[in-house]
Image (tube, grey):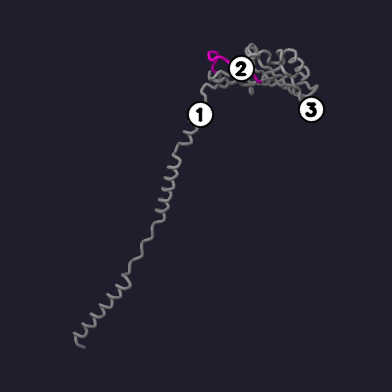
Amino acid sequence: MPKIYLAGIYVILIAVVIATALLTGCPQGKPAPQDQSDQTAVSEDETQTSEDDASPSGDTTLSAGSSEETGNPKNNQGTVTEEEIPGIEEIFGVVAFPEAKLNEETSMVQKFAEGTEIYRLGFNTTSPIETVVAWYKEHMEVGTEVKQLQLPVGTQVYSFSYKSPDGKMTKNITVQGFSAEARCDIGVNLIRAIEPDEKTETGNE
Protein backbone atom coordinates (compact mmCIF):
# COMPACT_ATOMS: atom_id res chain seq x y z
CA MET A 1 0.00 0.00 0.00
CA PRO A 2 1.42 3.38 -0.89
CA LYS A 3 2.81 5.47 1.98
CA ILE A 4 0.66 8.42 0.97
CA TYR A 5 -2.44 6.31 1.35
CA LEU A 6 -1.36 5.11 4.83
CA ALA A 7 -0.60 8.66 5.90
CA GLY A 8 -4.10 9.70 4.84
CA ILE A 9 -5.64 6.94 6.93
CA TYR A 10 -3.60 8.03 10.01
CA VAL A 11 -4.73 11.62 9.55
CA ILE A 12 -8.38 10.53 9.34
CA LEU A 13 -8.04 8.38 12.51
CA ILE A 14 -6.42 11.21 14.42
CA ALA A 15 -9.19 13.59 13.31
CA VAL A 16 -11.86 11.11 14.50
CA VAL A 17 -10.16 10.77 17.91
CA ILE A 18 -9.94 14.53 18.32
CA ALA A 19 -13.57 15.00 17.29
CA THR A 20 -14.73 12.31 19.74
CA ALA A 21 -12.77 13.95 22.53
CA LEU A 22 -14.30 17.32 21.81
CA LEU A 23 -17.84 15.94 21.74
CA THR A 24 -17.63 13.82 24.90
CA GLY A 25 -15.25 16.02 26.84
CA CYS A 26 -11.81 15.16 28.01
CA PRO A 27 -11.85 12.51 30.73
CA GLN A 28 -11.07 14.04 34.10
CA GLY A 29 -9.93 12.33 37.20
CA LYS A 30 -12.45 11.98 39.97
CA PRO A 31 -12.03 14.65 42.67
CA ALA A 32 -10.22 13.40 45.69
CA PRO A 33 -12.67 12.71 48.55
CA GLN A 34 -12.56 15.41 51.19
CA ASP A 35 -11.17 14.36 54.49
CA GLN A 36 -14.14 13.70 56.78
CA SER A 37 -12.10 14.59 59.83
CA ASP A 38 -11.52 18.05 58.37
CA GLN A 39 -15.27 18.48 57.83
CA THR A 40 -15.99 17.34 61.39
CA ALA A 41 -13.39 19.70 62.76
CA VAL A 42 -14.76 22.61 60.77
CA SER A 43 -18.32 21.79 61.79
CA GLU A 44 -17.39 21.61 65.46
CA ASP A 45 -15.41 24.83 65.23
CA GLU A 46 -18.35 26.61 63.59
CA THR A 47 -20.76 25.23 66.19
CA GLN A 48 -18.49 26.29 69.03
CA THR A 49 -18.08 29.74 67.49
CA SER A 50 -21.85 30.22 67.14
CA GLU A 51 -22.40 29.09 70.71
CA ASP A 52 -19.71 31.42 71.97
CA ASP A 53 -21.27 34.31 70.07
CA ALA A 54 -24.72 33.56 71.47
CA SER A 55 -23.58 32.99 75.05
CA PRO A 56 -20.10 34.33 75.82
CA SER A 57 -18.04 32.38 78.27
CA GLY A 58 -18.54 33.55 81.86
CA ASP A 59 -21.99 35.06 81.32
CA THR A 60 -23.54 32.77 83.95
CA THR A 61 -21.06 33.79 86.60
CA LEU A 62 -21.42 37.44 85.67
CA SER A 63 -25.19 37.22 85.85
CA ALA A 64 -25.09 35.63 89.27
CA GLY A 65 -22.65 38.24 90.48
CA SER A 66 -24.81 41.04 89.11
CA SER A 67 -27.82 39.63 90.94
CA GLU A 68 -25.92 39.60 94.20
CA GLU A 69 -24.63 43.11 93.65
CA THR A 70 -28.17 44.41 93.14
CA GLY A 71 -29.10 43.06 96.57
CA ASN A 72 -28.77 45.16 99.68
CA PRO A 73 -25.24 44.67 101.09
CA LYS A 74 -26.47 45.88 104.48
CA ASN A 75 -29.18 43.23 104.75
CA ASN A 76 -27.44 41.25 107.49
CA GLN A 77 -28.60 37.97 108.96
CA GLY A 78 -27.32 36.25 112.06
CA THR A 79 -28.16 33.72 114.71
CA VAL A 80 -29.56 34.46 118.15
CA THR A 81 -28.22 32.99 121.40
CA GLU A 82 -29.85 32.37 124.76
CA GLU A 83 -27.76 35.18 126.29
CA GLU A 84 -29.34 37.72 123.94
CA ILE A 85 -32.93 37.09 125.03
CA PRO A 86 -32.90 39.53 128.02
CA GLY A 87 -31.69 42.34 125.75
CA ILE A 88 -34.38 41.52 123.19
CA GLU A 89 -37.07 41.59 125.90
CA GLU A 90 -35.90 45.05 126.98
CA ILE A 91 -36.93 46.24 123.52
CA PHE A 92 -39.93 44.04 122.68
CA GLY A 93 -41.31 43.22 126.11
CA VAL A 94 -42.33 39.69 127.08
CA VAL A 95 -40.95 37.12 124.64
CA ALA A 96 -39.91 33.87 126.36
CA PHE A 97 -41.83 31.71 128.80
CA PRO A 98 -39.64 31.49 131.95
CA GLU A 99 -38.86 27.76 131.64
CA ALA A 100 -38.51 27.73 127.84
CA LYS A 101 -35.21 27.00 126.12
CA LEU A 102 -34.20 28.79 122.95
CA ASN A 103 -33.57 26.65 119.86
CA GLU A 104 -30.46 28.46 118.67
CA GLU A 105 -30.21 26.40 115.46
CA THR A 106 -33.46 27.79 114.08
CA SER A 107 -33.53 31.22 115.72
CA MET A 108 -32.27 34.14 113.66
CA VAL A 109 -32.31 37.91 113.22
CA GLN A 110 -32.30 40.07 110.07
CA LYS A 111 -31.43 43.76 109.96
CA PHE A 112 -32.08 45.80 106.84
CA ALA A 113 -30.35 48.99 105.74
CA GLU A 114 -33.57 50.98 105.58
CA GLY A 115 -34.11 50.41 109.30
CA THR A 116 -36.15 47.22 109.79
CA GLU A 117 -35.25 44.54 112.34
CA ILE A 118 -36.84 41.08 112.29
CA TYR A 119 -36.43 38.27 114.84
CA ARG A 120 -37.65 34.72 114.38
CA LEU A 121 -37.24 32.70 117.56
CA GLY A 122 -38.14 29.16 118.54
CA PHE A 123 -38.52 27.89 122.10
CA ASN A 124 -39.20 24.49 123.65
CA THR A 125 -40.59 23.88 127.12
CA THR A 126 -41.61 20.88 129.22
CA SER A 127 -44.59 22.75 130.64
CA PRO A 128 -48.09 21.85 129.35
CA ILE A 129 -49.70 24.18 126.86
CA GLU A 130 -52.38 25.24 129.36
CA THR A 131 -49.74 26.60 131.74
CA VAL A 132 -47.83 28.41 129.01
CA VAL A 133 -50.95 30.00 127.50
CA ALA A 134 -52.15 31.17 130.91
CA TRP A 135 -48.76 32.81 131.56
CA TYR A 136 -48.73 34.71 128.25
CA LYS A 137 -52.31 35.89 128.81
CA GLU A 138 -51.20 37.39 132.10
CA HIS A 139 -47.93 38.95 130.93
CA MET A 140 -48.59 40.17 127.37
CA GLU A 141 -49.25 43.86 126.74
CA VAL A 142 -52.68 45.38 127.03
CA GLY A 143 -54.38 45.25 123.66
CA THR A 144 -52.92 41.88 122.69
CA GLU A 145 -55.24 39.85 120.47
CA VAL A 146 -55.56 36.18 121.43
CA LYS A 147 -56.82 33.49 119.08
CA GLN A 148 -57.28 29.75 119.59
CA LEU A 149 -57.26 27.06 116.92
CA GLN A 150 -58.14 23.43 117.48
CA LEU A 151 -56.59 21.18 114.85
CA PRO A 152 -58.27 17.89 113.84
CA VAL A 153 -55.36 15.81 115.10
CA GLY A 154 -55.83 17.17 118.62
CA THR A 155 -53.11 19.82 118.54
CA GLN A 156 -54.02 23.11 120.16
CA VAL A 157 -52.65 26.37 118.80
CA TYR A 158 -52.82 29.76 120.50
CA SER A 159 -51.65 32.96 118.90
CA PHE A 160 -50.88 36.27 120.62
CA SER A 161 -50.63 39.34 118.39
CA TYR A 162 -49.59 42.79 119.56
CA LYS A 163 -48.80 46.05 117.74
CA SER A 164 -47.36 49.08 119.47
CA PRO A 165 -49.44 52.30 119.45
CA ASP A 166 -46.91 54.05 117.17
CA GLY A 167 -47.03 51.11 114.73
CA LYS A 168 -43.25 50.65 114.78
CA MET A 169 -43.24 47.29 116.58
CA THR A 170 -45.27 44.12 116.13
CA LYS A 171 -45.03 40.92 118.13
CA ASN A 172 -46.60 37.57 117.29
CA ILE A 173 -46.27 34.58 119.61
CA THR A 174 -47.64 31.14 118.78
CA VAL A 175 -47.94 28.34 121.32
CA GLN A 176 -48.59 24.84 120.03
CA GLY A 177 -49.03 21.52 121.83
CA PHE A 178 -51.33 18.73 122.92
CA SER A 179 -53.68 19.15 125.83
CA ALA A 180 -52.32 17.80 129.14
CA GLU A 181 -49.01 16.88 127.51
CA ALA A 182 -45.87 17.88 129.41
CA ARG A 183 -44.32 19.87 126.56
CA CYS A 184 -45.13 22.48 123.93
CA ASP A 185 -43.45 24.64 121.31
CA ILE A 186 -43.33 28.42 121.18
CA GLY A 187 -42.69 30.46 118.06
CA VAL A 188 -41.93 34.19 118.25
CA ASN A 189 -41.88 36.73 115.40
CA LEU A 190 -40.74 40.27 116.19
CA ILE A 191 -40.58 43.22 113.82
CA ARG A 192 -39.65 46.81 114.52
CA ALA A 193 -38.63 49.92 112.62
CA ILE A 194 -35.42 51.46 113.91
CA GLU A 195 -33.69 54.74 113.28
CA PRO A 196 -30.66 54.70 110.91
CA ASP A 197 -28.23 55.56 113.70
CA GLU A 198 -29.41 52.53 115.67
CA LYS A 199 -28.49 50.05 112.91
CA THR A 200 -25.79 47.57 113.77
CA GLU A 201 -24.27 44.86 111.63
CA THR A 202 -25.20 41.30 112.53
CA GLY A 203 -23.55 38.08 111.39
CA ASN A 204 -20.42 39.79 110.01
CA GLU A 205 -18.49 40.18 113.21
Asked whether residue 83 appears in the rendered view, the answer is: no
Q: How many discs mark residues in the rendered view?
A: 3
Which residue occupies the foreground of this view, 36 or 90?
90
In what element is the residue under mark 2?
strand
Residue 194 colored in magenta in the image = yes
Q: Quadrant of residue 151?
A: top right
Quadrant containing the N terminus is: bottom left
Q: Is residue 51 above or below residue 92?
A: below
> What label does residue 154 carry, if any?
3
For the residues carrying marks 2 and 1, which lies nearer the camera in this image? 2
Question: Residue drawn 75% across and 13% down?
Answer: 138
Relative image position of residue 30 (x, y in whole percent): 36, 65
Q: Are marks 3 and 2 in contact (CB under 8 Å)?
A: no
Quick one: which residue is furthest to the front in this view? 166
Q: Quadrant of residue 85?
A: top right
Callout 1: 10 Å neighbours few (<14), some, many (20+)?
A: few
Q: The residue under label 3 is which amino acid type?
A: Gly
Q: The residue under label 2 is which amino acid type?
A: Arg
Residue 158 colored in magenta in the image = no
Q: Which residue is mark 1?
A: 68
Q: Which residues are magenta?
A: 189-201
Relative image position of residue 163 (x, y in whole percent): 67, 17
Q: Quadrant of residue 144?
A: top right
Q: What is the C-alpha distance between the residues marked 3 and 1?
A: 45 Å
Left or right of residue 68: residue 101: right
Q: Are marks 3 and 1 in contact (CB under 8 Å)?
A: no
> What label does residue 192 carry, if any?
2
Q: What is the C-alpha distance between the residues marked 2 and 1?
A: 26 Å
Which residue occupies the foreground of this view, 72 or 96?
72
